[in-house]
Image (spheres, coloured by chain):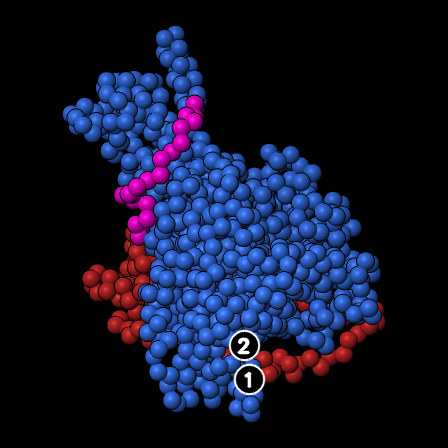
Amino acid sequence: MTEFYDKLEEDFRNSFEPPSPPDEKIQPWTDTKIVGKPLQRVDAYERVSGKAEYTYDVILPDMVYGAILRCPHAHAIVKNIDTSAAEKMPGVVGLITGKSNGADIPWYSVGYGGGPMQSKLFDPHCRYQGEEVAAVAAMTPYQAYDALKAIKPEYEVLPFVIEPDEALKPDAPKIFEAGNSTGKPMPSQRGSVEKGFAEADVVLEETFTTSVQMHAALEAHGSVVKWDGDKITIWDSTQGVYDACMLSFARTMKMPNNNVRVICRYVGGAFGAKLELGKYTVMAALLARKSGRPVKLMLPREDTMLAVGNRPITRMTVKAGVKKDGTLTALQLTSVYSPGAYSSGAMTGFLFQELYKCPNVMVTESGVYTNVGRARAFRAPGFPTAAWALEQMMDMLAGKINMDPVELRLKNFTEVSQSRGMPYTSAGLKDCLTEGAKRFGWKKSQAAKKEAGHIKRGVGMAAGLWMMGSGGPPYTAEVRMFADGGVTLKTGAMDLGTGTKTVACMVAAEELGVPLENIRILNADTAITPYASSSGGSMTLASLVPAVRRGAWIVRRQIMDWAAEALGVSADDLEIRKDTVVSRSNPDKKRTLEQLFRAKGVMDVIAIGNREPNPANKVVMPFSAQFAEVEVNTKTGAVKVLRLLSADDSGRVGNLKTYENQVYGGMLQCLGYGLFEKRVMDRKTGKMCNPNLNDYKVPGALDIPVNLDVAPVDLKDSECNNVGCKGIGEPCHVPTAAAIANAIHDAIGVRLTNSPMDNRIILELLSKQKRG
Amino acid sequence: MPDHPDKKDPASHEGLSRRGFLSSVSAGAVVAVSLKSAPEAPAQEINATGKPVTISLLVNSSTRKVLVEPRWTLAYVLREVLGLTGTKIGCERGECGACTVLIDGKPRYSCMTLAVEAEGHAITTVEGLLVNDQLGPVQQAFAEEDAFQCGFCTPGQIMAVEGLLRTNPNPTFDQIRTGVSGNLCRCGTYKNIFNAAAKAAELRKQKGGAL
């Protein structure tokens, strides 16, 4: 009997003693059996059967529903709130305002990482239409919204300002005591633009503007929360269970991290708007405390349009100098944006500093507060906006010096990061341009005769890159192999619909030599899965899968060492085939995993794979070049995009199917940005006119070109990480609007500097062109 | 059943008339005085919602008796009362199509249908397309063609395609496009959705038109 317990103790010890991580460098794959193939997603069944559980779908016993009362004015002070009638409404179980216990919480920090706080969870000074005033919980959402109508706030309505230019005037209504500027503009200069302009044969200057684009993820922001004493479980529609929710919630509520569990297995779209802790999460937690019940608080569509993010409005003045041979001599960007009522970045400068070889670059960005909903990160923040200006300017320069637009870009191609002065691990822009042009039939399309009637055809192209596609540590994945060859992966990473989970499983299967169906993945639950930073910045795949490969590699090495010892052959001669370790040189020499595990007294082998650091003296960067063909109806101004092609250097393709799918989406969202997406503000009231999906137009099935083509460029980057992949979600979203604008110019000779390219503006410009 | 429009206006992205409308509604003057925003009516009048009624809903071939308020939408009752959360809510005003279900075989926005209106009609949700626990042909086609990204609009897209194929088993490409034009996909997966619909038509034929 004691032997039995001794054995158990030994087994127990063995199974929890992690294999020591070897410090060997993992060699890049030369060819792959699974990675890169177009495979069906591992969670396809859940997503098409209706069984995938999104935050919105969580239903708990005794759960009640939360709703938020928002300020209807663009600028107002809440003088008083009468909640007495609302609290007596049928079904109401909790009501909170800024005066409630625990609700006096600072909110909205200036800049990133602990800047001063600008506001509160419920700020009596409401700086935009949609600012939070009170929240209720009731037995049904209908009763919660009844109760909102019965809350009686008393507002002192203040003068407002919604236009950035007006907000800078001295007599403009003050949004903050210190004024409406977000800070003194800090020009950043490399070389001397004055010298560069002097050297140029041609200098052009143009001003470009972009409108506010809404994220419009189909699943609204929201949370379901449940307290168990001093511990809370939060289901949140988020891009990061750790950084965006657990850690920031714990910090905000002054709780130990360990008492906060956050789960988000499925998220119904995010696009950058779910990278930060929501006020709704904290309000749900306060309401759940007050009512003693779990609370579900999902925002209505209108609330998401008013209060939880957008891509900010910008005005960019660009001055550029070029020699007759196409050499860029100087680039100057002066960019003004409005983050809305609270601090948020613009990031329009980096593309100018990085995309092309140019010794003289000057960037000046400044922001101004206005009484409108605050901006948040939106898919490649600043980059589609900057490309709108820079890539149209490149087209204008090409036209002026009679050079092909692709040639001009190739002429200024660089293998060295211009902003950091270090070489790229792989510089695929050249191949994106040449391969893209070839596959699109660029020369042929350009030469094709333009139609004589009122329908004019044109082609255009644009390039881009994205500054954060390298991924990096800290990022961990747990790999656990059972004796039957089954493998469980655990990661805190999200799968926003990008196919992350599938590629992670493919990488594990590739490394371990087991079939894909052997791998099961559990993700995004802080109580179960190891740390991963938020899914944003196109960093998830390139952060996660090298960690997965490292973990799988450790597991495989451990098993190979056991097998080598048992079989008397070198570990290098061994491979796993399904559930058996086999000698390559002598296939008769083999052991099942079951045999190997039993001999060592373990039931499973577990390893933690850590993401290795990025190379020290090189820059990892994904690139994109896109091509568009359009038709413009010169009688109506209507634009029809006939086809789009995206050539992307994002390193090794993880799964061709999900890769292509993501690139289609990147192009179409940016097509929307260029052609019809626009937040419309009412100048008389400062309110949003189109806070819904009918009046705010996102691309639909009939609005898009069917001819979408994707051309991956893979330079076999062996330095970026052990899988060789770089981010794809954002670079493929950068150039599209500019490429379409350039195609429209090619078709009708009109330069559209304001996005979106409304057909009325096209008609106006055409009639101006006619008048000469 | 009211015959509410399920399809978005194909030309709506032009936005001319809408934008024109928007610029003309800004007539209200800015009020710079203290005012009370809530209506003066007493609370109980606001809650004049009608007494709850018991109704029988025929959902995925099962009859379910539920006590509902007359104002509750079918989407709400399916999800929060019956627990059929495959049907999604994206806008609650008939704009996005995430809540699409079949009512008597036709695609309908369940957020624009009151539960009381759905009594006496056959309702099919995405869960109802499973054959035991196996994917139905449209679901299978969506899985194989990678016709989703985040997957939130997907049940609605699937139901739109299911409804289309029930009335038109051999749709043309344009009929497919129009058939799903009432369903938004913010991830931009339309190309694969069109392909999935075409493949679903094939799969249905192979399975002898089985649901």
Chain designation of label 2: A
Chain designation of label 1: A
Residue of label 1? A765
Q: Is residue A290 visible?
A: no
Q: Colour of chain B?
A: red
Q: Is residue A372 visible?
A: yes
Q: In whole angstroms, how far apart are the C-alphas of marks 2 and 1?
A: 8 Å
Residue A752 disc label? 2
Query: Residue B100 appears in which quarter of the rendering?
Result: bottom left
- Amino acid on which disc 2 is placed: Leu
User: In the picture shown, does residue A349 fall above or below A115?
Assistant: below
Q: What residue is rendered at 28% in x and 18% in y?
A: A565
- Amino acid on which disc 1 is placed: Leu
Q: What residue is rendered at 56% in x and 60% in y?
A: A352
Q: Is residue A678 left or right of residue B199?
A: right
x and y, in percent, of residue A93 in the image: 67, 51
**Does mark 1 fall on the same chain as mark 2?**
yes
Q: Colour of chain A?
A: blue
Q: Residue furthest bottom?
A: A771
Magenta residues span A20-44
x and y, in percent, of residue A712 in the image: 36, 56
Q: What residue is rendered at 44% in x and 85% in y?
A: A633
